[in-house]
Image (cartoon, rainbow, N blue to C red):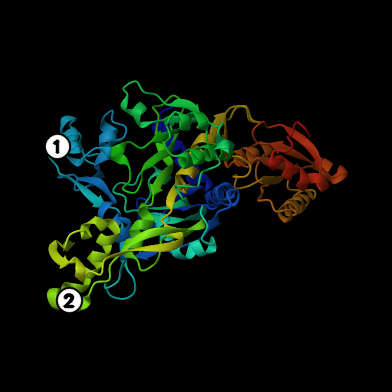
Amino acid sequence: MTDDTAADRLTELAKRRGFFFRSSEAYGGVSGFYVYGPEGATLKENLEDAWRDRFVRREGHMEIEAPNVMPEPVFEASGHLDGFDDMIVECPECGASHRADHIVEDNTDIEEAESIAITDIEEIVAENDVVCPSCGTELAGEPVEDFNLMFETTIGPGSSSPGYLRPETAQGIFVEFPRLKEYARGQLPFGVAQIGAAYRNEISPRKGLVRLREFAQAELEHFVDPETDDPDLESVADVEVTLYSEAQQDDEDGEPVELTVQEAVEAGVVGSDWVAYYLGVAQGWYERIGVDMDRFRFRQHRSGELAHYAADCWDAEADTSAPGADPDWIEITGFAYRGDYDLTKHGEYADDDFTIFKQYDDPITVERATVDPEMSYLGPEFGGDAAAVGEALEDLAERDRTAFDDDTVTVDVDGDEYAVPVEKTGFSIEEVTEAGEHVTPHVVEPSFGVDRLVYTVLAHTLERDDAGEDADEDRTVLTLPPELAPTTVAVFPLMDKDGLGERAGEVAERLRQAGFEVAEDASGSIGRRYRRQDEVGTPYCVTVDYDTLEDGTVTVRDRDTTAQARVPVDDLPGVVADLRAGETTIGDL
């Protein structure tokens, strides 16, 4: 089976069974925008709840919901206006625009072209006779340029207040840090999570949910004191992870290696203890939601592809190709140590405090250099620049008190130098008692692509066998974990007559009242109904038959094994709950 066949098969199933499909198809459709159907919307919600359970509740973090539109100064501070670009090349014949690094990857052996410089990409395009994917025209000699991915809008009438759709949910957390630290009582460490939509004007959206223009993220920003806050590495020390480091990627014969989290930290493969901790936590969570760990790895970002804010970053990657096909690795999560970049930048641009006051155990006495400039001298001497000169003197005193050792001190204001007699600066050294200090927290960020996780889980749980009830037909099965399955249990009457349909409706309602997602189906043979539910991942089916009318029992069938057991209707809600939680099996029954 080719990779294209695997992707096409998944896309066909997703559309036919209501998982996801392209939006606005009645108007021709728009690339990069998808609708989650009834099955997909519930699957996505269940996956988000599983993420919230592991990365918010169990970690003791808080969750917020920030706006999708934010004013321009936010993204000036964050660096997105200047550095949030992809490489674009335009076909001279048909005018189609393509992401240059992607067509290089598609036409060469290069796996990660995003980190390659634009001039080198142009050379690779020419040397490999890369052509336009749309019309086949040669692209050699065509310029490769940066294209900013931000969606621009205006806030209010007119164009005086530009805004942007957020390209990541993280900025909504960073911008609100001055308020959020109050909810954390000013104590580090603390984490803030958000699940929501983000928007990127992708050059060439492709492969369904893998590359979208509107997509969902589940992000956690964990604020820590780099001097004193350490993760609970012991809790994940023995977790085995597959690591594909930068060194292994640079080695022609390099391959991913299996290490425990503890071994990876001790060997320096993962440089940040906090990143290592979240790799260990995430490993177990991926297994929980149905990711095939034989088709999974953590890949370290190479130096050329690191984001402007990241000191180190690892991607969780999943291979979504069919068995036997060439691997198709997609990024599903980024684990970044962002340092203090974000809060420092917003502190420079915004009118608020993006630090935490760190109380000392005991007050300390320190020497501080201060200035008290004589403005009666600075004003006549420097005119309109007097205030700026005064501020420059204050900054210099904090940085380098030895600059005031001579009779004259020189400061720089916007490239111009000003000499000031030291006696006019009011320079002095004073002893002060301090109860604490202001620190800028560092940020550890696990950022999960929800849509790509949905795609991966579907790709990894989609199976086909010929072990179904009708031997002449293949059985397509989504082996979704029960907690993610859109429907927990389906209820069938053996036949829709003799009161069986009414009794099946009563059983279904009892299960709904117990809190389960329930489907009812009375159409076609039992075998076909089973297969329909197998195809959407329903883990359990209940059949109401004539014995039910006599003794009050029903047949419960397991999706993965097709094993069946008789269960009293009165016990059914508890049995389904135990099955879903993994506390019992059909075999036990």
Residue under the point 40% across and 65% down = 353
Residue 18 spot, x, y in % from top left = 52, 48
Location of mark 1 (residue): 140
Q: Residues within 10 Å of mark 1 (few under 14, many from 20)?
A: some
Q: Distance between the Cα atoms at labels 1 and 2?
A: 65 Å
Observer-side mark, 1 or 2, equals 2
Quarter of the rendering containing residue 347? bottom left
Residue at the spot 24% in from the left edge and 37% down from the top edge: 116
- On screen, residue 452 versus residue 522, left or right, reads left
Picture quarter with the N terminus = top left
- Seen in the picture, residue 118 relative to 173 is either above or below; the reply is above
* Label 1 element class: loop
Which residue type does callout 1 highlight? Ala
Residue 18 seen in render: yes
The disc placed on residue 309 is: none
Q: Which mark is residue 377?
A: 2
Q: Position of residue 298 (x, y in %)?
A: 44, 34
Q: Quadrant of the C terminus?
A: top right
Q: Which of the two residues, 247 or 85, is positioned nearer the viewer here?
A: 247
